[in-house]
Image (tube, grey):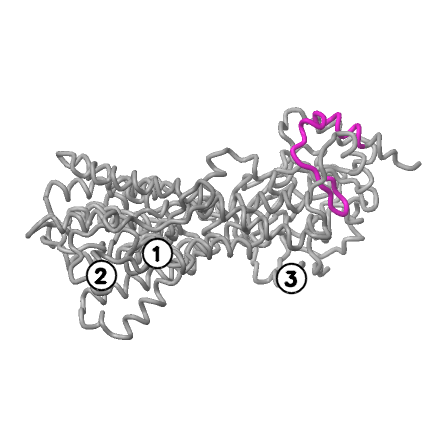
Amino acid sequence: MALDYRKCAEEISKNIGGGSNVISAAHCATRLRLVIADNSKVNKSALEEVDGVKGMFESNGQLQLIIGTGTVNKVYDEFLAVTGASAASKDDVKKAAASRAPLWKRLLKTPGDVFVPILPAIVASGLMMGLVEALGKAIPTFASTDWYAFLDMAANTAFAFLPVLVAISSARVFGGNIFLGAVIGLMMVHGGLLNAWNAGSAENVAKFFGIEVNGMNPYLVPDWSGITVQSIGGIPSWKLLFFNVPRTGYQGHVIPVIIAVWLMSLLEKWLHKHVPEMIDLFVTPLCTVLATAFVTFTIIGPIFAQLESWVLIGAQQLITIGFGVGAFAMGALYPITVVMGLHHMYNVIEAGMLSAGEGALNIWMPIASSANFAQFGACLAVAIKAKNMKTKAVAVPSSLSAALGITEPAIFGINFRFMKPFVAGMIGGAIGSLIGAWTKIGATSYGVTGIPGYLTINNPLLYTLVIGVAAAVAFIITFVVWKEDAPKAAKVEKPPVDMAAQPVVMKVGAEEIKAPAVGTLVKQENIPDPMFAEGALGAGLAIKPTQGIVVAPCAGTISTVAETKHAVGISTEGGLELLIHVGVDTVKMGGKGFETFVSEGDTITPGQKLITFNRQEIQAAGYPDDVVFLLTNSDDFGDVQIFA
């Protein structure tokens, strides 16, 4: 008898709490993939009894109902009609599942998603900038050579065009066109705009825009002392409608770029849905870029420009508060302004301090150095404590860069991503800055922090105390409170199975996956269960075991662990969704004879013990003990090879 697709869809809707409980719905070749708002409304036992539903499981925040090839698409169409849900892609469903995480996790995840892909460029450039700057200060004659100019250019390129890198990565995260994102980023550092790092200097503003000073060509003015940006008429602006748009760039900025590209991505998606296909190719990009650019330079940019002014005014007022209270506060807040891209503006404060008269000192420099060295200490603690080699590989050079005064790699690559090290750095920076204020040390120059700061500080011994305390406090706090997200992976002493001897049973692109159990390989069509054999749950194979143990076939994260302990799901960095299912119909054993050694969310390493099972108990219960191993999203990949 043919399946009644409408009835199947209605019963599914009824047992998941109705259409209002569906966040997103999509389907693959065999399964209906749902993201549910409230899981307590789902009647799982009733769902399994629905005619047409061959099975169900949960993975990565999705409820997946196995319907079957050629049938699922028809049930899906009826499901959309019954529930009123909108059609979505598998990627949309994955994003919807991720969106169910707590707000604070999602807010922290976004910067991580943006910065992780561009870390190699930031880390390499940060370390190179620190080294080049240190050499230039240590050897003044080297600073005037062509080699210095070349190395300085090569080193600071990633930071000079950081908005472009951030924009491209942000577009990828928000689902926008990465090339349109690149245009927005390039626009924000366009050569026709004054470099944001020079916006506080009247000399730079005048020369860039060709503004005469006291009737003289700006290049011929003999003395710039006492001349301010305001005194030469301010920074030129464009008059766009009723907006005055300052002609300054956004070098070093991060947040306004991310906001701008987020807005761009939303607008682009909306236009793609509403603009007729015939004209979509040129209308959507044109309108997206123009509208985003206008909003960025008239609203988003000015908001952050005003924020810069408030930060500068607030910083100037804070550091004058007695007993070191102001220095303490700014030592804590300084890394936050680095995240916002405002820290380059502090040169205005430093220059003002040094111009106060003969013998004046830059007392801001110890504050900045304390904050930077504290981030170094926190990052170094992560580098030492981390077991994950990828984390360690980023943390080591990033900490060295921070010690040389360039903290962006440490902050964006490690500390801000994991947050606890960032907060530890804020505490260490505050304490170091407090000591700096009490000891009244200062610098005779500006723009230099960290180790190169020894060349400008008035008391090297006290400076060592200040930055040493800042780094030590941050290091100790981080080492105590920060824990890596893979504690169970770190406890694995020796793989219970010799993975070198295990055969490769799956190959997806260049990724090879080994067998999760020791035994004889069984082709998928010979698995003693129709649902597995027909590929309803994805392509794979089975293993007739000779040992009662299941191990991790590759590195990844545990996405699900069956309550009855007979199955686990694994997600890999490459996007593979693997299912290891011990036995056929063993769910009916209620967990008897099984023991699991991992929990959902655990990071696993190849060969790590996942499940042990009693083969005799399974056989005594009358069930096959084949270890079924499937790639449940095999239809997402076009080059899956199974070796059995």
How crowded is the residue under tag 1: few (<14 C-alpha within 10 Å), some, or many (20+)?
Answer: many
Residue shown at the point (72%, 47%) measured from the top left: 276
**In x, y percent, where is residue 22?**
67, 31
Indicate the quadrant containing the C terminus: top left, top right, bottom left or bottom right.
bottom right
Question: Mark on residue 195?
Answer: 1
Which numbered tag is attached to residue 509?
3
In this rendering, position of residue 527 left or right of residue 456: right
Q: Earlier in the sequence, mark 3 or mark 1?
A: 1
**Residue 538 appears at what percent x and percent y?**
73, 49
As rendered, which of 555 and 334 lies closer to the eye? Answer: 334
Farthest residue, direction right: 1
Horizontal arrangement in the rendering, residue 471 relative to residue 580 (left or right): left
In the rendered structure, which amino acid carries the disc numbered 2?
Answer: Met
Residue 7 point in image, percent of width and height: 84, 30
Q: Are marks 3 and 1 in contact (CB under 8 Å)?
A: no
What is the CA distance from the residue labelled 3 to the residue labelled 1? Answer: 45 Å
Range of residues picked out in magenta: 9-32
The first of marks 1 and 2 along the sequence is: 1
Evaluate if marks 3 and 2 touch, with contact meaning CB atoms under 8 Å apart.
no
Quadrant including the N terminus? top right
Q: Is residue 14 magenta?
A: yes
Q: Nearer the viewer, residue 253 or 461?
A: 253
Residue closest to the far left: 358
Tag 3: residue type?
A: Gly
The residue that disc 2 covers is 216
Task: Give the foreground label among 1 and 2.
Answer: 2
* Residue 542 showing in the rendered view: no
Q: CA distance from mark 3 to mark 2?
A: 66 Å
